[in-house]
Image (tube, grey):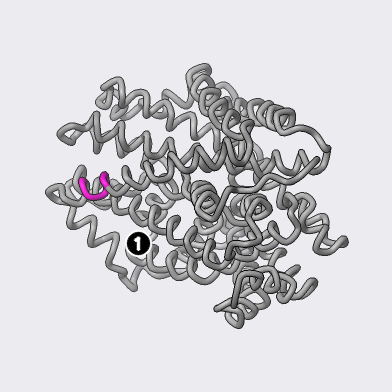
Amino acid sequence: MGKRSTFSGKLGFILAAAGSAVGLGNLWRFPYLAAKYGGGMFLLVYILLAITFGSVLMITEIAIGRKTQLSPLKAFGALNKKWSWLGTLATIVPILIFPYYCLIGGWVTKYAAVMVSGKVSEAAGDSFFKSYISSTSQPIIWFLVFMAATTLVVVFGVNKGIEKFSKVLMPLLVFLTVGLSIYVVTRPGALAGVKYYLLPNIKDLSFKTFLAAIGQLFYSMSLAMGIMITYGSYFSKEESIEKASRHIEIFDTAIAFLAGLMIIPAVFVYSGGDKSALGTGPSLMFVTLPKVFSSMPGGNIIGALFFFLVLFAAVTSSVSILEAIVAGVMDRFNVKRITATLLVALYGTVLGIACSFGFGIWDSVKIIGFSILDFLDFVSNSIMLPLVGMLTCILVGFIIKPDAIISEIELNGKFTIKKFYIAMVKWIAPIFIFAILVSGILQNFGILNI
């Protein structure tokens, strides 16, 4: 295979890894979960989990990647041969997520195009979104456009593709997020939404809040997907893992925070303070927000900027998901990057089309009561992500021991949270994640109602 590719420096790594973390999880998923689970209380719980669980898991995954210089498929086996199966599990996660993530990316691309064409009022129609996703050809066309863009970046590799792409898009993404957030919070009527989002109410604290926040944490920070291990394998031995991880966490959490600050007050403005308008769940971005933009002065421009912002974020994440799979294929089958990328893209296209049909001509096809997309989302997010996260903690905490990871982290100086890290990775994280895993599965099947 030759010498392994590397990022040109810390900035390139941070922007690429932050680009992976900042995606639909931040700009689509985070705001509707925050809206659903109490605004300020969800935000507080999420931030606390990010600086504890998120920090420990991210440091661990980056260190595993850099220590082994391998993709997730082989990295766990390099740490302990008897645990090579965990590499297979970790690789399955992005394989499941990639097709439907690109399909949703195609939806975002469609909406960006609609906004640019000045048809915001059309997108605000009650039946527009449902009519679009249930049609046969339109969603697939836009899905293929999104898939092609993702594939092209990964074909160019780590330096010429992923790093250069991230260095351009991430600063632009930050600029747009900050600008749109300032615009929204200064609209008449936005203050009520800002208060709901920023001020925690103890009445909103529940186990469901923790369940939603920890699930969002894995999704938003690209944890247990093999992505941070893959990017870690491209990270220079001369750079600090602890500092780089902290920068990624701050970047990711800040964008998620701003996304909520942008979307929740916007809905309050549109609805006149009616909280029920926040309750549309996953369709908040595609159903409620176009109505918000339609009611705003200059709504076409604001809507176009918003959906291009989401599109940029979606592509940076889809690139990282594809790269995690491609790295495994290259390591396993010793094939060239272009071959591995095109093969994975072909697989993603076939399954992505099936997911799209699940809302239209295959609407009657259900897997244990789920549509095709919802089934893949349930297996990956409710089962695989927490399972891989928990098993990674057990491997590091009790099989190879924390010192094996700490020694890699301390190549660049003192590990300032060593004692906290050991306690988290050995005891607190795996026990907590196990409870979340079990309760999440039971809740999905209606066995447990917390």
Question: Looking at the image, which residue sits at the far right?
Answer: 82
| The quadrant where residue 396 appears | bottom right
Identify the residue shown where x is 19% and y is 46%. Answer: 269
Q: Identify the secondary structure beneath mark 1.
A: loop
Question: Looking at the image, which residue sits at the far top?
Answer: 137
Identify the residue shown where x is 43% and y is 32%. Answer: 108
The span shown in magenta is 179-183
Q: Main secondary structure of the magenta part?
A: helix
Q: Type of residue at label 1?
A: Gly
Image position, residue 199 (x, y; %): 27, 67
Number of other residues with Cα within 10 Å of mark 1, as a class: few under 14, some 14 to 19, many 20 or more:
many
Q: Which residue is mark 1?
A: 38
Q: Quadrant of the N terminus?
A: top right
- Residue closest to the eye, 12 or 321: 12
Q: Is residue 75 left or right of residue 292?
A: right
Q: Is residue 217 left or right of residue 390?
A: left
Residue 231: in magenta span: no
Identify the residue shown where x is 54% and y is 62%. Answer: 245
Question: Looking at the image, which residue sits at the far bottom?
Answer: 419
